[in-house]
């Protein structure tokens, strides 16, 4: 049976620099966990359309955007340190119930 490919959005207010840094961090974390993920970047104003499409498993964003994103009822990977791949891996494992 093929492994599930997780669909992850990384975002920041403008969908540029920070979203791209998050994308690289999340891709690395998924790879190190041996999980397949399609990671795309967007901005804060476009995320609702992507979520409405039903094509999103997880959202990764900087921690200070939690209040704006919690309304979507999509599991959140909240990042404070953009070099902490271990912390992101731990969040992914917890959200996906992986030991």
Image (cartoon, rainbow, N blue to C red):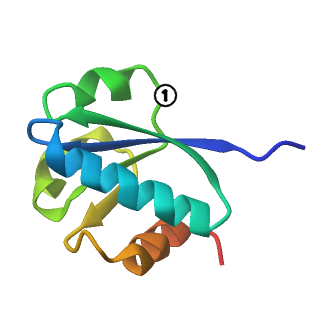
State the quadrant of the C terminus: bottom right
Q: Which residue sits at x=25%, y=27%?
A: 48
Left or right position of 29 against 69: right
- Is residue 43 left or right of 91 when viewed as pictured? left
Q: Is residue 84 found left or right of 33 in the rendered image?
A: left
Q: At numbered mark 1, what does the secondary structure look like: helix, strand or loop?
A: loop
The residue lying at 26 percent from left, 54 percent from top is 21
Indicate the position of residue 79 as horizontal and vertical percent values.
Answer: 25, 66
Q: In the rendered image, which quarter contains the N terminus?
A: top right
Q: Is 85 situated above or below 26? A: below
Residue at 62%, 68% in the rendered image? 33
Task: Specify the farthest residue to the right.
Answer: 1
For residue 75, above or below residue 94 = above
Q: How many numbered markers are drawn?
A: 1
Instruction: Please indicate whether residue 12 sits to the left or right of residue 26 in the image.
Output: left
Asked whether residue 34 appears in the rendered view, the answer is yes
Mark 1, Cα crowd under 10 Å, few <14 / some 14-19 / many 20+, is: few
User: Which of the pair 28/45 is nearer the observer?
Assistant: 28
* Residue behind mark 1: 55
| x and y, in percent, of residue 81 in the image | 22, 74
- Front residue of this view, candidates 84 and 51: 84
């Amino acid at each position: 049976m093929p492994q599930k490919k997780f669909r992850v959005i990384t975002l920041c207010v403008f969908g540029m620099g920070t979203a791209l840094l998050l994308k690289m961090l999340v891709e690395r974390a998924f790879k190190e966990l041996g999980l397949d993920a399609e990671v795309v970047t967007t901005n804060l104003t476009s995320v609702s359309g992507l979520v409405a499409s039903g094509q999103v498993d997880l959202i990764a964003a900087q921690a200070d955007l939690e209040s704006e994103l919690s309304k979507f009822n999509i599991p959140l990977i909240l990042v404070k340190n953009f070099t902490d791949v271990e912390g992101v891996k731990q969040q992914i494992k917890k959200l996906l119930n992986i030991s």
